[in-house]
Amino acid sequence: MTDGDPKTFPASGAEASGAEALDPEAHGAEAPGVESFATPGARASGGEELAGAASGAPRGSAFEPPDAHPSRGKGFDLARLLAERGAERYELHTKYLNHQLPRMLHTIGFDRVYERAEGAYFWDSEGNDYLDMLAGFGVMGLGRHHPVVRKALHDVLDASLADLTRFDCQPLPGLLAEKLLAHSPHLDRVFFGNSGTEAVETALKFARYATGKPRVLYCSHAFHGLTTGSLSVNGESGFRDGFAPLLPDTALPLGDTAALERELKRGDVAALIVEPIQGKGVHASPPGYLRAAQELLHRHKALLIADEVQTGLGRTGDFYAYQHDEGVEPDLVCVAKALSGGYVPVGATLGKEWIFKKVYSSMDRVLVHSASFGSNAQAMAAGLAVLSVMEDEGVVANARATGDLLRTRLAALIDRYELLADVRGRGLMIGIEFGRPSSLKLRSRWTMLQAARKGLFAQMVVVPLLQKHRILTQVSGDHLEVIKLIPPLTITEREVDRFVAAFTAVMDDAHGGGGLMWDFGRTLVKQAVANR
């Protein structure tokens, strides 16, 4: 997916380990922004207010005097609220949300204050631009605030539609389903939810019901989400530990058809769920694997589920990543992230007619699987606008061409830098892996980092990319020496030039053997050792 979908904020060894260091996209731990601003609560009235005042209610409660917060009593004004309290963003997050996120950001110097964003760029309070090579863990496929998506949302709000009546059929969900299915002609129906993990949960439920079998297979190191069902097919123990019991499941090595066949012979397998390219480490399924797996699964009356939450909608240079393998036609496909346009959460599970007909087999079962906010008008309008932009602006072709250019230019640096081990991926989903150098001086420093905590060198690269070159990237997973690039699909050669120049400068610094980069590395080592 991813990531939870994997999916990673760069985190120091001292401040984050295990699941904490992995991509919080998929974890729901988003960067602080408008979402983390606390809005004043409504005041109590009548006897409750008097009782609160008499009891000495704490500051911030509903019983405070009217002047406790300047924005109260003036009606809701978002611009005023942000102007008055926006500077509190990190304090608010520390007090009311996941306190480890601001702690981690402060530790590695990522505690920036971004004021606005457009396309593939942010700007801070001083007017400096930052290149976004992370795209909100893949959510911002079209970049931020695309004018077509933005207008669609204004239009749907202005239309005052009778949305979510629960007892009618609005046109937008059907229109979006029709558009999505046009890219997967072997699939017939769509269920709309609100996120990638919901799309996966839907696929798991549908597969188990349609086949009558309980067990789902998944691949080692997979990431499919963090709700209970999705967590059951998560390939990382750091996410699973402490949340048992989970659903019946079995992990398989990615690409191992013999292991798949052994499990299928037990007769209790409902499905295999697989990311065509794993978010953690950016590992593609071997050529021919998905086709062979599909044939084995169908022979044993089990289903193939393609998790395209992160890889879908053009990310890899085709509309879906499974389309890189000829003859692959998954029974269920999960999408989300980029379908939102970066505005309204949405997830979709596409499937075959017979599966939906089994799940919704009678009028008595009409609501056997549903979502309160699924198919809401805002999400549907955003999705329709996204697909329109992708067609009109050639987004998939751009992702393929720009991705090929970026990957080729990075791969050309492997012979130049002994710390650079591999560049891989498809389209604009690229993994940059670092490895053990050959020279004695660099090897001793590499060994020092590895002894303290594997993955520290990749973090040493991510930090100066932001601090010195104003480029936001991510480490691809905990204990991995891999950086994952998943920028907006709309970037051009200009952004490729900027990233390659910055990455080259960081590699020059690392291979120079001194400077601030290795000083920071020594700091990370000390923190990692102190926190063991």
Image (cartoon, grey):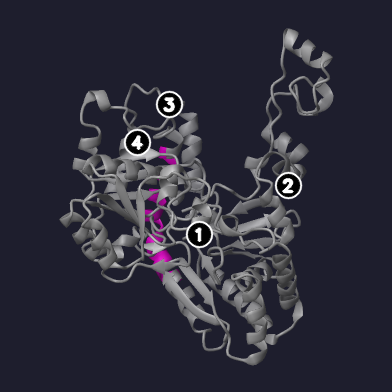
Amino acid residing under circle 3: Leu
Q: Earlier in the sequence, mark 2 or mark 3?
A: 2
Q: Mark 1 and mark 3 in contact (Cβ < 8 Å)?
A: no
Apparent side of residue 213 relative to residue 154 in the rendered image (left or right)? left
Query: Is label 4 in a helix, a strand or a loop?
Result: helix
Count of all numbered marks drawn on residues in the image: 4
Amino acid residing under circle 4: Pro
Q: Earlier in the sequence, mark 4 or mark 2?
A: 2
**Mark 1 residue crowding within 10 angstroms, few (<14) / some (14–19) / many (20+):** many
Magenta segment: 380-402
Q: Which residue is mark 4?
A: 173
Which residue is rendered at x = 73% and y = 59% of the image? 107
Which residue is rendered at x = 69% and y = 66% of the image? 528
Q: Main secondary structure of the magenta part?
A: helix
How far apart are the alpha carbons under marks 4 and 2?
Answer: 38 Å
170 or 29, nearer to the observer: 29
Q: x and y percent of residue 130 in the render?
A: 65, 62
Query: Is label 2 in a helix, a strand or a loop?
Result: helix
Q: Which residue is mark 3?
A: 161
**Mark 2 residue crowding within 10 angstroms, few (<14) / some (14–19) / many (20+):** many
Q: Which residue is mark 1?
A: 488
Which one is in front in this view, the residue at disc 3 or the one at disc 4? Answer: 4
Which one is in front in this view, the residue at disc 2 or the one at disc 1? Answer: 2
